[in-house]
Image (tube, rainbow, N blue to C red):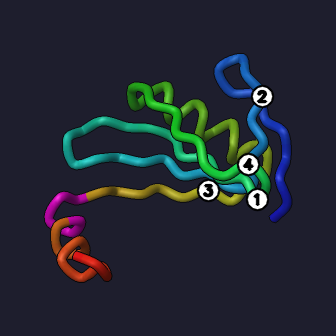
């Protein structure tokens, strides 16, 4: 998908996809990816992040939910090259 401009928190972002991220400590954020601008992380409470996620969904962007589990990240970290 190509990048589109989307207004989130009163600021324009260039976005091609988004993810609602739930971390194992309970914090949430919205991860935004752009083909031209890289990645941005918007931290907020669950309600804020879900509103931003909904804006991305309503704009027709590909979206997903990502749950980060410390046990999985530790297992993965042991298997990454250079570790």
Mark nearer the viewer, 4 or 3: 4
Left or right side of 2 for 52: left
Q: Point out residue 55 in the picture as x, y percentages from the top left corner.
A: 69, 36
Distance of label 1 from label 4 (alpha carbons): 6 Å
Q: Which residue is mark 4?
A: 37
What is the magenta range? 69-73
Residue 57, numbered circle: none
Disc 3 is placed on an element classified as strand
Is there a contact, CB below 8 Å, between mark 4 and mark 3? no
Residue for point 40% across, 31% down:
46
- Mark 2 — residue? 12
**Front-lying residue, 74 or 57:** 74
- Give the CA distance from mark 3 to mark 1: 15 Å
Q: Is residue 67 left or right of residue 3?
A: left
User: Where is mark 3, residue-wise?
Assistant: 63
Q: Quadrant of the N terminus?
A: bottom right
Question: Is the residue marked by circle 2 packed among few (<14), some (14-19), or many (20+) residues within 10 Å?
Answer: few
Q: Residue at position x 85%, y 60% from top?
A: 2
Q: Which residue is mark 1?
A: 35
Q: Position of residue 73 (x, y in %)?
A: 23, 65
What is the spatial separation of the Cα atoms under label 2 and label 1, in whole angstroms?
15 Å
Corner quadrant of residue 71: bottom left
Q: Nearer the viewer, mark 2 or mark 1?
A: 1
Residue 15: horizontal and vertical position, in percent?
A: 74, 47
Tell me the chief SS of the magenta region.
Answer: helix
Pointer 1 local density, CA inside 10 Å: few below 14, some 14–19, many at least 20:
some
Q: Nearer the viewer, mark 3 or mark 2?
A: 2
Secondary structure, mark 4, is loop
Q: Earlier in the sequence, mark 4 or mark 2?
A: 2
């Amino acid at each position: 998908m190509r990048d589109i401009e989307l207004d989130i928190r009163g600021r324009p972002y260039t976005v091609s996809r988004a993810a609602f991220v739930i971390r194992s400590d309970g914090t949430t954020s919205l991860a935004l990816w752009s083909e031209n601008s890289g990645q941005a992380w918007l931290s907020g409470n669950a309600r804020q992040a879900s509103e931003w996620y909904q804006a991305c969904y309503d704009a027709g962007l590909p979206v997903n939910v990502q749950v980060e589990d410390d046990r999985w990240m530790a297992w993965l970290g042991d298997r990454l090259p250079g570790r």
